[in-house]
Amino acid sequence: MRRLLIEGHYPPGSRLVEERLASDLGVSRTPVRQALVRAAAEGLVQIFPNRGAVARSFTIDDLLEMYDLRALLEGHAAYLAAQRISPQQLARMEAAAAALEDSLNQTFARREDEVHFLVEQNAVFHQTIAEAAGNQRLIAMLNQIVAVPLQFRSFYWYRTEERQISNFFHRSILNALVLGDGDRARAMMREHILYGRDVLLQSRRAESAAVASGEENEP
Amino acid sequence: MRRLLIEGHYPPGSRLVEERLASDLGVSRTPVRQALVRAAAEGLVQIFPNRGAVARSFTIDDLLEMYDLRALLEGHAAYLAAQRISPQQLARMEAAAAALEDSLNQTFARREDEVHFLVEQNAVFHQTIAEAAGNQRLIAMLNQIVAVPLQFRSFYWYRTEERQISNFFHRSILNALVLGDGDRARAMMREHILYGRDVLLQSRRAESAAVASGEENEP
DNA sequence: CTTGGAAAGATTGTATACAATATACCAGAG
DNA sequence: CTCTGGTATATTGTATACAATCTTTCCAAG
């Protein structure tokens, strides 16, 4: 809920003074505090006793940790889904995969709209698998992990080549699920996520290097 | 923190009225609310908007879900630990395993003390592996999952045969870690946990049956 | 006897006030 | 000029008061 506000608006590492948040949101400190406690439990902010909260910043190691767990959990979800997924759920995934493919030939009014659409359809694809796995706690854990890198990975959706590879993985996973082959579904899902991780890290490293060198020789 | 209070004191499914908790703990509603929000984020209680919180009750299916995830996560932790564990950590695990073995021949003043000791040493063994895996988020996730069934599994520690088998698994895991064999460590950890699951479920089912049949033909 | 609805009671959600704690700033001594 | 100590300010932690919402009860009509 407040997650969206925190993710986008407040830069990582910045102090979150309760009174300021309260006036920003037009409420008093009480509900703000609750939201902070909750966000802290989800790992989005850190609360230091008597010293307030800061928007949690994520290092490269943090991202590695999260992607490692995501590969494990989503791989497992895909494995379980292969035995239990319903025709309706398969249809929804099929539609999402097709939408992601079609979008390569579509043109959007604004780049933001396009990214938003891609993130949305991708979420449908992955959430349907988690749902089909039929483990509520698994879903909850994935929600915690998947949400975090969203603030970074927008760039991911800008490059055509990565999108094509991503689409290919989606089709492979879908195919394995249709065949009920849990092992293949898991393997493909793992690769899909670890590939996404590598793209993200490559980009982050390039970014850091650009910043380090002064960031003025860019095209 | 409040977790301990909730686990032991308030029966699952009971309403947690804020004012009552406040007077029980000698504080006002404000900190109680925060604790409830936090506990809800951790899955220990459920909060229904405008209708208050209830101590979450866990069905057999919930336990199956948790053990499934625990096998996945701890198995993964054991796999990672095989490559990274330090001699100090191995020594700590060795000591815990030995303590669990020795306790079979020891006699305790009270049964409660014995169970407490066993749970403690077992926690050291498992937490050291999670720690050696070197993934903070993995540790956090395991803490959430492992804590919950503690309210049920005390019975587990009463039977000699199960304890011997559990000790055997501990030795197998330890041996695999010493050899740096991640695959074996993962396989043994998975079996260890799934065996624990089966024992727990068997007991729960027997319990339900006893309740259903009137619970008066018991020795 | 059952059912609909309104009022009373109980409980949660929010705002505000005050106390406790940490941080920043300034003065004075070394 | 630097370091130490104290005071002032800012911010968090808690308590209490009030508003919003839900639940229960009771009464009347069918």
Image (cartoon, coloured by chain):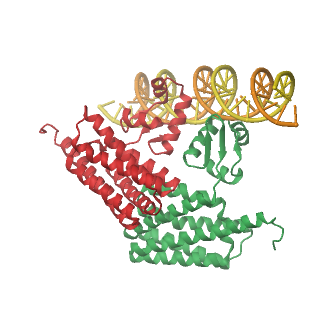
Chain colours: A green, B red, C yellow, D orange
- Does A116 sit left or right of D25 as displayed? right
Going 26% across and 45% down the picture, which residue do you hit? B102
Going 43% across and 74% down the picture, which residue do you hit? A177
Q: Position of residue A144 (x, y in %)?
A: 54, 54
- Residue A207 vertical placement versus B149 (above, below): below
In this view, the residue in front, B103 or B135, is B103
In this view, the residue in front, A61 or A115, is A61
Going 50% across and 37% down the picture, which residue do you hit? B36
- Does B113 sit left or right of A179 as displayed? left
Q: Position of residue A210 (x, y in %)?
A: 76, 67
- Does B167 sit left or right of A7 as displayed? left
- Residue B33 vertical placement versus A127 (above, below): above
Q: Is residue B199 visible?
A: yes
- Residue B70 vertical placement versus B31 (above, below): below
Query: What count of labels does the image hold?
Result: 0
Q: Position of residue A47 (x, y in %)?
A: 61, 41
In this view, the residue in front, C13 or A146, is A146
In this view, the residue in front, B38 or B101, is B101
Q: Position of residue B179 (x, y in %)?
A: 38, 64
Q: Is residue B58 visible?
A: no
The quarter in which the C terminus of chain B is drawn is: top left
Q: In which quarter of the view is residue A66 placed?
A: bottom right
